[in-house]
Amino acid sequence: MNHLIAPSLLAADFANLQRDIEMVNRSQADWFHLDIMDGVFVPNISFGMPVVKAISRHAKKPLDVHLMIVDPDRYLETFHSLGAAILTVHYEACTHLHRTIQKIKSMGMKAGVVLNPHTPVHVLEDTLEEVDMVLIMSVNPGFGAQSFIEHSYAKIRRLKEMIRAKNAGVLIEVDGGVDLTNAAKLVAAGVDVLVAGNTVFASENPTETILRLKNLY
Ligand code: DX5
Ligand code: ZN
């Protein structure tokens, strides 16, 4: 399949959020990536439910919600009611990951699992066939505009191999430090969904940057 682009609104201008959402609506982007941080699982706080609600009123593309919070089970229903299409939880934050995945899917959302840079892909050996997407963090979560961790390529290739071996229909998403210099290499390594925050919103022409990420030029 052609790879998808998910601009991260963490890098948008929060004082002009509607304008930035409408730019994404009109662009070649496929999803909105929303980063929810609780100041506990990660050393930063982003935005919460009222903002997600406001975003979902204007967004015309699926909401890809990345939960960087402890005990995400407490909020699965909330994010479903706020309009999440894909709900992604951290492997490191889930004691009963299998149960959490089943719960997300039972509500009709796509279920994603995200791995921090230090977490090897083999921990998903027994859950891979249950999930719709695996998100590989290519920076330590918590902040935008960090540098891409080169070791992520090896993880992506290994994960792709695991997915192939199981013949599973699992998407690979990558998040953190994605830019115009590494996007094509990431797609070649097996990535299906590119998240990009700073690269899109700090660029002179975000619509054009999305087009370039989508068409890899
Ligand atoms: C980081 C977040 C990312 C972040 C990416 O914890 O999960 O989604 O917005 O930002 P960039 O693309 O600027 O590295
Ligand atoms: Zn994210």
Image: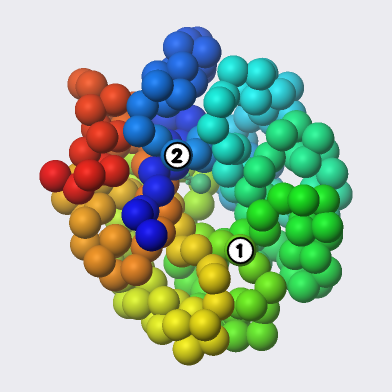
In this picture the colour scheme is: rainbow
Query: Residue 152: x and y, percent?
Result: 35, 68
Of the 4 image quadrants, the one containing the C terminus is: top left
* Residue at point 29%, 25% (across, down): 207
* Residue at point 38%, 60% (across, down): 1
Q: Quadrant of residue 75?
A: top right
Alpha-carbon neighbours of circle 1 within 10 Å: few (<14), some, or many (≥20)?
many
Residue 30 image label = 2
For residue 168, side relative to residue 70 (left or right): left
Disc 2 to disc 1: CB gap under 8 Å: no
Mark 1 = which residue?
132
Of the pair 32 and 114, the residue shown nearer to us: 32
Q: Relative to 168, say whether 27 is above or below.
A: above
Q: Relative to 9, say whether 39 is above or below.
A: below
Query: Residue 22: x and y, percent?
Result: 46, 17
For residue 96, side relative to residue 162 (left or right): right
For residue 192, side relative to residue 101 (left or right): left
Of the pair 36 and 140, the residue shown nearer to us: 36
Amino acid residing under circle 2: Asp
Of the pair 166 and 144, the residue shown nearer to us: 166
* Residue at point 29%, 61% (across, down): 187
Of the pair 204 and 92, the residue shown nearer to us: 204
Query: Residue 146: x and y, percent?
Result: 34, 46
Q: Is mark 2 within 8 Å of ligand 2?
A: no
State ligand 1's quadrant. top left
